[in-house]
Amino acid sequence: MILEQAILDVIPGKQQAFEIAFKQAQVIISSMEGYIHHQLQKCIEKDNRYLLLVQWQTLEDHTLGFRESPEYQQWKALLHHFYDPFPEVEHFQLVQA
């Protein structure tokens, strides 16, 4: 299993619109092959910061299967205009449970 992590800094004042758009976008990502689970959490200290965690079966399920799909273009259109700066996405593997 691979854990994708992204810190999403949303343009201040656009948090509510982002959350509404994310409700639509999560339907897209959850339908992708290799998708396991996701969660979106809101930062307590910074009102416009979110943490997105997505579990994938393999790294390629995210980097190739999702990111190179037509569905990713829909995801991008729904969400990418909310970010400033654009988030860095990292992937993690479990070392110890």
Image (cartoon, helix red, strand yellow):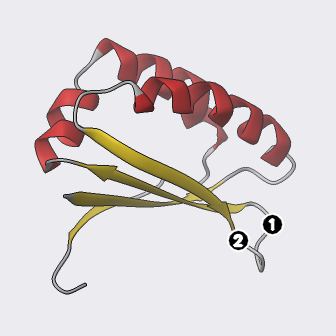
Q: Amino acid at mark 1?
A: Asp
Of residue 10 and residue 94, the one placed in the foreground of this image is: 94
As helix, strand or loop, the secondary structure at mark 1 comes to: loop
Quadrant showing the N terminus: bottom left
Using residue 20 as the reference point, say whether residue 63 is left or right of it.
left
Q: Residue at x 19, y 29 (%)?
A: 65
| Residue lying at the far bottom of the rendered structure | 96
- At which x and y percent is residue 17? 80, 35
Circle 2: element type = loop
Can residue 8 be seen at all in this image of the molecule?
yes
Of all residues shown, which one is farthest toward the top? 70
Of 32 and 9, the residue lying toward us: 32
- Depicted 32 relative to depicted 54: above or below: above
Residue 5 pos. (x, y %) = 39, 62
Q: Which amino acid type is shown beneath numbered disc 2?
A: Cys
Relative to 10, does residue 76 appear above or below in the rendering?
above
In this image, 97 relative to 30: left or right?
A: left
- Seen at 15% across and 49% down, the residue is 59
Residue 43 badge: 2
- The part of the image, by quadrant, that contains residue 23 is top right
What's the mark number on residue 47? 1
Task: Tell me the crowding category of disc 2: few under 14, some 14 to 19, or many 20 or more residues within 10 angstroms, Cα based.
Answer: some
Give the alpha-carbon distance from disc 1 to disc 2, as whole Å: 6 Å
Q: Is residue 13 above or below residue 67?
A: below
Q: Quadrant of residue 93?
A: bottom left
User: What residue is at 60 percent from the left and 47 percent from the top?
Assistant: 83
